[in-house]
Image (cartoon, helix red, strand yellow):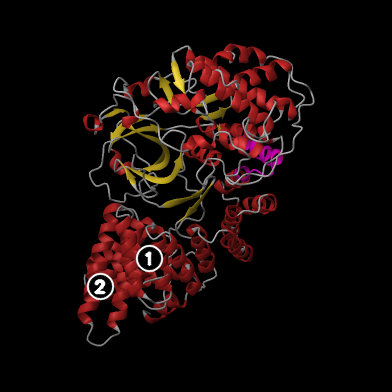
Amino acid sequence: MIKKRKDEWIRGVFRVLKVYPFVVGTLYYVRLDPGKAGNGEEKASTRFIHAMDLRWLDRHTRPESFLHRDPSPFFPVESLFVEDGVLYQVFENLEGTLLAHHLYRSAPLSLSGSVRILKAVAAGLAEMKMEDGVTVIHPQNIFLTGDGARFLLGGPEGCLPERAVANSGALNPGEMRGSDEAREVHALGTLAYFMLTGTGPSSAEGGPLCRHRKNVPLEIEEWIERSLSPDPRERPGLAALIQSLDAPVPETDEPEAAPAENGPKGIRNDPFASWLHGKPSLPAHPLTPGSWEGWTAGRPFPANGEKGSSPAEGSDEKGHDKSRELSPGLKVWSKVPGKGGDVSSDRPLAPVKNTEGEPRGFFPPRRTKRFLWTAGVLLALGLGASGYFFTEGSLFADHAEDAARYYGESVRFMQSGERAQALAKAKQAVEADPSGKEYWLYLARLYGEKAEYEQAKKVMLRGVKSVPEAEMYDALAVYALYSNDLDLAERSVRKAVSLDAKNAEYYFHQSKIEAARQDYGAAVQSVESAIRLSPAEPVYHFSLAEYLLKEGNSKKAVEHARKAVESEPNEPEYRIRLGQAHLAERERHSKEKGQEKKAAKSVDAAVRTLRDAIELNGDNAKAHYFLSIALYYRGEYQKAGESAQRAMELKPKTAAYHYQFGVVLQRLGRKQEAADHYRKALDLDPGNMRYQKAVEQIR
């Protein structure tokens, strides 16, 4: 099976954002392009998609059966399709805490916590068995929810590769015998042993359970010991486990063995790690990829013929503004507001330093509730994991279970619009588990959504003391920037870069902080570092074009603005920036002797680009404003006036638009009207000497 890489496309409508090795196949975190999905989707959204080789399934398997599996133990599948011999399952909603992540951070667990998880998993498995279902008993495949446990993979018998089902309770060929229940019991016993001891039963540190924990009720201890028997016939049944879990749990149930140092992958003698290696064995009569190619079922996501295209990644309710995802719980806009909120320039009708219309915060009004579960799952999966979902970090205290519960409750409150309760639960999660990076990021984000950046900054100041990691310092830097604490922002982003010099986002945010200081030379260097690490990211080229214009390098600004447009042709802001760069090139050529034709070509290019931007978003005042400037240079004064007037109608309190309209009116001989608009511009921006001179010269 050919695996997709980051920024590649699945079916031409899903862009891969993250790739996770999975116990069976591969799990992708993707962004859906609404413009090309053809299914009524109006906004850019994210999904998890599982992929596995179609040949791993027997020819009698009916893939559409995934759509009809029991929603109690399984997450619903939204859509299915086959592309290039790979069966893809699209999941719209994954809620809960990934068991793999929880075990990494908490094992060994308290006895009460272990019993709760075993009860939830066993109950889900028993419910599945009533419908003759199968699944993979592996921490990667189990999510802990508020009311139990759910599985990602599984369904009717035959829906999983042979080796995957065998692995669900067999860790070596000798154990791949016996019934499905015997294999599942073995896997549950392994899981129980690991939760209680923090190590694998067959490791050098293993041995009898009583060697590690002396407070385990005899019924549970005996079940675990028997479940690990190499002879499947000696293993107890699932019903015996459920019965043993009703045994009273001692009041003092703290783990008696302190967590040992992590192994090379972050888990000490992880008994499940080997399951990520190798491929399932092909059945004797597999499904034939050729006869299934192009097959779909469930919610339609039609294939886009232009697989290599780069659709817009984000849009507001009208499909316009652009934002990028920084990390779970935090979004950063593609532009950072500078000092001053108006349009100004050193010369009449020259390209301007424009911040009008730029977002003032990370959190756009268009944010949907779907982001809440997506962020929660991403955090649970552990972004940036090296090969496993078990990410590197320190184990945290026994209160981790409470923290996870508070976090889940907070997410549910946010989904129902109860922000005050969500905030209270998020604070409880942080207090219960200060080492939980995701809880700090999530709490800060709740403040950030309401533009309470000072509060978000205070949260992250506490957070970096508990979790001094690069991602935490980067988040602190961004919130400090938006609360105008540039010194703290600069120190924090430098710390993030020093901890992880290979993360393009950190250099990008560093450039925003330097731009806020108006140090555009340094901003150019920082965003160029980001581009070296991630050359296909359009927002980096977009920002670099902005800084290059500030530095007077219009030629390179055109080059990078064009790259942004080529990557995302549906983003109007990128076209506006390119039009602005063409206007700057016109000014450069106009100062050079004999370059009149080049200057005219630059104006023509600006007009075309800005009209394209208006075609994408007719309500963007900046596009009309810059088009007015371009048309003025081309001598089309009537049309220039119409564009300037439209910009004013959209943003009547922007001084530069009134000034531009005044310039055009004066050129048309309508001096009194021009004077009125010059005065209006000066009223809106009393300290602007350019507007003052315009008022004086027309008297």
Type of amino acid at the residue the image marks with label 1: Tyr
- At a point 27% along the width and 75% down the height, the residue shown is 667
Type of amino acid at the residue the image marks with label 2: Ser
Q: In the depicted view, which residue is nearer to us: 159 or 661? A: 159
Which of the two discs, 1 and 2, labels the residue nearer the N terminus? 2
- At a point 59% along the width and 37% down the height, the residue shown is 270
Label 2 belongs to which residue? 602
| Whether residue 369 is visible | no
Q: In the depicted view, which residue is nearer to us: 627 or 325? A: 325
x and y, in percent, of residue 81 in the image: 30, 32
- The answer to which quarter of the image holds residue 190 is top right
- At a point 35% along the width and 56% down the height, the residue shown is 620
Neighbours of disc 2 within 10 Å: few (<14), some (14-19), many (20+): many
| Comparing labels 1 and 2, the label whose residue is closer to the camera | 2
Query: Which quadrant is the C terminus positioned in?
Result: bottom left
- The answer to which quarter of the image holds residue 105 is top right
Magenta stretch holds residue 397: no
Judge from the rendering whether residue 473 lies leftward or rightward of residue 679; answer left or right: right
Q: In the depicted view, which residue is nearer to us: 364 or 302? A: 302
Q: Label the magenta part by its dominant secondary structure.
A: helix
Q: Which mark is residue 31?
A: none
Judge from the rendering whether residue 176 lies leftward or rightward of residue 573; answer left or right: right
Residues rendered magenta in the picture: 418-439
Answer above or below: position of 135 versus 608.
Answer: above
x and y, in percent, of residue 537 in the image: 39, 57
x and y, in percent, of residue 98 in the image: 55, 34
- At a point 39% along the width and 62% down the height, the residue shown is 542
Instruction: Looking at this view, name the residue that lies furthest to the left.
Output: 597
Label 1 belongs to which residue? 657
